[in-house]
Each structure stands twice: as C-alpha cells, then as structure tokens.
Image (cartoon, coloured by chain):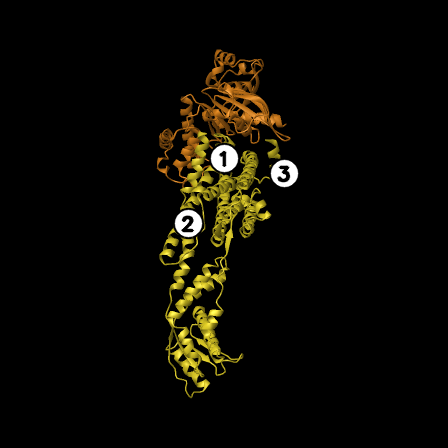
Chain colours: A yellow, B orange
Amino acid sequence: MRKFLAVVKHEYKKIVLKWSFLIGTLLFPIIAAGFAIVPAIIFSIKGEPTRIAFVDQTGKIAPRLRESLAPEKILEKARQAAKNSEMNLNASQQEQMQRGTEQLGGSFAFVDYSADEKSLEQIRRELNEKIIQKELDAYLLIPQNFDSPGAKYEFFSRKAGDFVGERTLRDALNEAVRSQRLADAQIDESKLKALSQNVNFEAKGVDEKGNEKDSDSSFIAAFIIGLMIYITLAIYGQAIMSAVVEEKETRIAEILFSSAKPFELMMGKLVGVGLAGLTQLAIWIISALVLVGIGVAQMSAAGISIAIPNITPLMVVYFFIFFILGFFIYASIFALIGSMVTSVQEGGQFSFPPIMLLLIGFYFSFAVIRDPNSSLSFWVSIAPFFAPITMPVRILSEMPPFWQIGLSIFINSLAIAAMVWLAARVYRVGMLMYGKRATIPEVWKWIRQS
Amino acid sequence: MTEQNTTLKVENVSKHYGDFTAVEDLSFEVKAGRVFGFLGPNGAGKTTTIRMIVGITYPDEGKIELFGERISTEMQNRIGYLPEERGLYKKMKIQDQLRYFAALKGVAQAEADKRIDFWLERMKLAEWKKKKTTDLSKGMQQKIQFISTVLHNPDLLILDEPFSGLDPVNVEFMMEVVSELKAHHKTIIFSTHLMETAERLCDDIILINKSRKVVGGTLRQVKAGFGKNLIALRAVGGETVLQDKSLVAKLTAHADELEIELAENADAQILLKRLLESGAAITKFEQIEPSLNDIFIEKIKEINA
C-alpha cells in the first residue's frame, strides 16, 4: 500500500507540477471567457459613423430613411433583436453572429447634397470625387421609379467590407420603401404593424415529474459537459500512455518491477494521473461556475434576464462519477497500448481505436441531447465505453430514472474490471520486452499465459 | 559454513519461454558477505536468472531461497538491483528520482534525503542534485543509477554490468565503492563478461553458458580445477632435473625464461626442491595460474565444439 501511494504521489506530481498543466488549466477558463467576452467587446467598438449622402429624385424615400436610421431607432431595433436571440440559443453559429451584429447596428451621419438639375453622370462624378477627397464615406442612389420591381438602388461605399452598416442600411431602406408603398396605397401603417405582430413563442421542456424547465440552456450545458469529458479523457489517456512508454523506453521498468508489484505500479499510475485529471476538471468546473455566476450577475444588473441551466449538486456528483469510470476504462486501454509499443510515436498510431471510441461516444451525445428519452439514448448511456460521455450529457438534458444511472455505473464498473485485468497482464510482460513492438497474437498469448 | 551464511540458494531452477529454454537446471549458492561473480557470454541466461532472483519473473521449476526463505515480493526491499538495461526519468530532477526509487523500496523520505545527500557526496555529484537527467553525462547517469540501487541499504546487491560505459578512472572509483560495500558485509552478485574485473573483485564465481552451469566455486578452486599446471622458471643450471620425465611433461623456451608443464601427479614443491639441490641459481619460480579469461574462452570453446 505504501508503495502504491508512492507511485500515486509520483505520477500526480509529475503531471501537476509541470508548466503545461498549469498553463492548460488556467488557459481553458481564460479561453472560455475570451470566447464569451471578446466578440462582444469587438462588436461594441462602434467606429466612426458612416457619412452618407442620399440622392433621392423622388424626394419621398430619403426623409423616411433618415428617420429610420436615427440613433434612437437603431437602438430600439437592437433591443428587439436581442430579445429574439435570447429565445434562440441553439441557432447556428452564423445566425447567432448575424443577430449579434444586428443588435449592435451601425451609425450614420447624413451629408446634404443637392442633386437639382444635374445629370446622373454628373452626380456620380461629383460624389465619387467627394469620396476620394474623404469628405464622404458612401452614397445611395434612389431611382425615380422606386416602386417598380425592376428599380435599382445603387449603393457606393468606401467601406465595402462594413457588412454591419450595409445591413442596417438595407433594412432601413426596405422599411422606408415599404412604408412609402403603404402610404401610396392608403393603408394605415401603425394598424398594419399591430396586425403583423409576431406571436410570442416560448419553448419549454417538461420533465418526468411534470415540472417545466428551460430547455435551451441545458442543451448548451450538456454539450459543454460532453466535450469536456471527451477532451479530458483523450488528454489524460494519452498522458498515461506516454508515461508508460517512457518507463519502458528508458528501461526504468526493470528497476520498478524489482521494487514493487507490476499491478501496484500500473494502478498507482492510473490513480495518480486520474487524480491529476480530476484536479484539472475541478478547477475548470469551479471557474466555469464562477464565470457563469459573474456573467449572470452582470447581465441581471444590466437588466437582461438570462436563463442558466439548472445544475444540482447531485448532477455534479454524477458527473465526477462518470468521469472516473471513463477515465479508468480508457486509461487502462492506453496503458495496455503503452506497454505494447516501443515509442510514443508508435503508440500514437495505436491510440486510434480508443480515440475513435471516445469520438463515437461524443457524437452519440448529440443524439442524446436531441432526444434524451429515446431508446438510442438509453442504450448508449448504458453501454460501456460510451456511457462516460453520454450519461452525464443525458443527466443534464433530462434526469433519467435512478435505476438506469445505477445500471450504467454497474456495467461500466464491470468494463473497468475487465480492462484493468487485461491491461495488467499485458503490462507486466510487455514492459520488459525490449526492441520490438508486440504483435496482437503475442499480446493475446501473454494474456492467456500469465 | 552454516545455512545462515547463505544469502541466496538457487536449486534446480529452469525457465522456459515457449520453446526457448532460458535457464536449465541451474543450482548455486551465494555466501553472505562475499562477492559472487555471475559470468557467461551474452544470451547465456544471466539476466533471466537475475530477474528470477529479484522477483520480476518466477522459475518454472526449482526453487530460489533468499535469506533462508522462499523468494517473495516482500524481500525486494532487501535487494538492490542495477539492471544492465537501465535508465532514469529524462526530465525529472535527480533528487526527485532518487526519492521516488527510495520510496518504492520502502524508505521514509527524511531518511532517504539523508542518504541521497551522503551518496551524491560520495559520488562527487552533490552539485547535480537539482539538475535534470538530460543535463548529466552518461557516466554521471550511471553513478546516479548506482545510487538508486544502494539507497535502501540492501543486504544483497545485484549489479549487472555495472561498469559498462564508464571511463577507466571511474571504473577504478566504482570498484573502490563496491569494495567498501563488501567491507560492510554486503553480499554482492556481480554479473559481467569482463573477466579482468571479475578476477579482481570476485571471491566466488559461476560460469554459465547456453542456459546451463559450466563451472563454479571459489575463484581458487575454479582455477585449480582448470588443470594445466604451468610454471615459469628463470634459472642458471639444473638442466638435468628438467630432463626428468616424472616431473616435467613439456618444456617451452620463452625469451628469457622457461615454461614448464608439470607431469601428471608431479608436485611443484618437489621440482623446486630438486632444482635447489642440483645447485641451480633461481631468479624466478612462479606457478602460473590460468586467467579467468583463459578459462572462460577455453570452457566456452569446449562446449561449442
């Protein structure tokens, strides 16, 4: 036992006291915070207002356009967009990005330009000249036949890449033209607006007990949890493998085996590295909770209410249990591979199967998120190798009955026993084989022999 | 010698790997406080035997007794093993590695730290304590590995080619250290194929080849048992005595001395006495022992022939 603890301590310190661990552990929350905060900061930098001139030969559109591009109006629209996006957290990335920019909008300064009695050619020349002189950023030509379907609205801009401003302008223009058409058709605009109001659609999940819950935020939390487990298992599994390979490559194994039982050595390694993984995960989870807490506090201070996933302490406990289960399953596979091969590079090639299993588990978690109560979700959250990822995802999406969680823990514990048993047999022979990689039949022989 | 003085007893031990026989019916004893040379060419089965002694593998047949008991993993704390294939953690500080190896042998950290300081000082490596393996030369690493085998103050030391890769100065130094350990009543099993070093260090030897024992015993016995009774003589006169066929089987003249192969059952002392009686002036009369190297080569050839 004392030797086992010595191995645990050694393996733990070896990982935790490394710079890479410190950086990785701290970097993750920083990157996560960065992803949340940086885009908001960047888009909130509003830049100079676009100096724009309208050339309106009809005189009908420009005033409306000016009105709808006024700062107060833009702000109001942004609020509306914010409200929409809040309801639609699982929209695609691109969509979310667009919405984000809508919320921010562009700002405009209007430049007066008198186009009286000038030909189109002349107007263009003059305005282009102004743009070159940097007196103007953009101009819009509103055609005489603004109402006909073939009418061409021409927009010229120095800032061709300013899609935010362009989008704002286009929306405002559409609105101005539409309201002009309505006015021409003698339809009351305010009435129409009232009539075409969107319905207020709110999606709520209902859990087994009949309680309502907010579904959107759990989707994201479940996804993040699945990703976190997937990444940590892959990283720490490979850490086990390279630790095993190092001891084999440097021939330290022979000294170790003359000091302690191979099983003690292997288990000590698994537990030590596992504890390092748990340490990192705990830091991440705590910092995530703190970050979310701060974020929510700031949001509510700003008057925006945001739904946070309802995570109970029991869920956190389950989460750690399944992480530990997954860790031991995959770590013993990686230890087995490490004792078969002769170098880390060779191990890299052989770690494809376990990585594949992890990845499949991760992909299954999408199916689980979409329908946590389907029979597919049931089976993958119980199956060994997949359950460590899919079960926590399922628990977060929708708490399954306890017997299913218990069954999953039981089955995966059996899987651990089997994998550790296999790995221990390969480990104690493989670690003393120098020079060449073991073949699968050889490994099979070791398993049966010892 | 009594049983208690036997550190290690190997009895009819065999080990097979599939169809390959690594060790066959091997028996020998190692007495306490002596240096035991475990000799043999590469692939003779030395490493396999040693692995069985230190409890890494187990014999298929026969038994191994250590300190009067059957070999067990608990006994590993009393053995210091320096394998031929050995290494250190590349990116770990010397002190941390030595602490770990000591902990694996059941030494408490405070005690381990004291011994680490002592041994680093003894090996003249004290200033490297906080350095990493990659900063050390190969010879230094070898000394660190040696320290890791003696940190837990083992009663039995098994050194497999301990001097390979060391320069002559360091070989000399390490031999001195081994002698010190012997003076502290440690039993040392010394595996090598360098016969000169074995001859200098070992009290007892065993020579194995092709998984079997060839010859064993005290160094003296082995040499005496090798047969050829040669004498180097430098003398003026006494020619008549040398013609006596009952004493001298063969006479070979070298540059300034004669090599005499004694006849069967002839005694070197009688020859010396007869020479003196005949009035010969003797400046050199030396019984030539076969070197371990000669025995090694001769024996291996004999078997392979």
Task: Looking at the picture, tell me which residue is in the foreground, A412 or B56.
Answer: A412
Above or below, comparing residue A78 to residue A206 in the picture: below
Image position, residue A303 (x, y; %): 37, 58
Q: Nearer the viewer, residue B5 or A397?
A: A397
Query: Which structural element holds mark 3?
Result: helix
Q: Residues within 10 Å of mark 1 (few under 14, many from 20)?
A: many
The CA distance from mark 3 to mark 1 is 25 Å
Label 1 marks a residue whose chain is: A
For mark 2, does the 10 Å Cα neighbourhood hold few (<14), some (14 to 19), or many (20 or more) residues? some
Q: Which-is-in-front pick, marks 3 and 1?
A: 1
Say which of A103 and B261 sits in front.
Answer: A103
- Disc on res. A267: 1
Q: Say which amino acid is labelled 1.
A: Met
Q: What residue is drawn where x is 45% and y is 71%?
A: A166
Give the tally of numbered discs.
3
Q: Are marks 3 and 1 in contact (CB under 8 Å)?
A: no
Q: Which residue is mark 2?
A: A288
Cβ–Cβ below 8 Å for labels 2 and 3? no
Residue B134 seen in the figure: no
Q: Residue at x 35, y 56 (%)?
A: A301
The residue carrying mark 3 is A441
Amino acid tagged 2: Ala
Tell me which numbered mark, 1 or 2, is placed earlier along the sequence. Answer: 1
The disc, 2 or 3, on the residue closer to the chain's N-terminal end is 2
In which quadrant is the C terminus of chain B drawn? top right
Mark closer to the observer (2, 3): 2
Tell me where residue B185 appears, x and y as whole percent: 42, 21
Q: Name the foreground residue: A434 vs B242.
A: A434
Report helix, strand or loop for mark 1.
helix
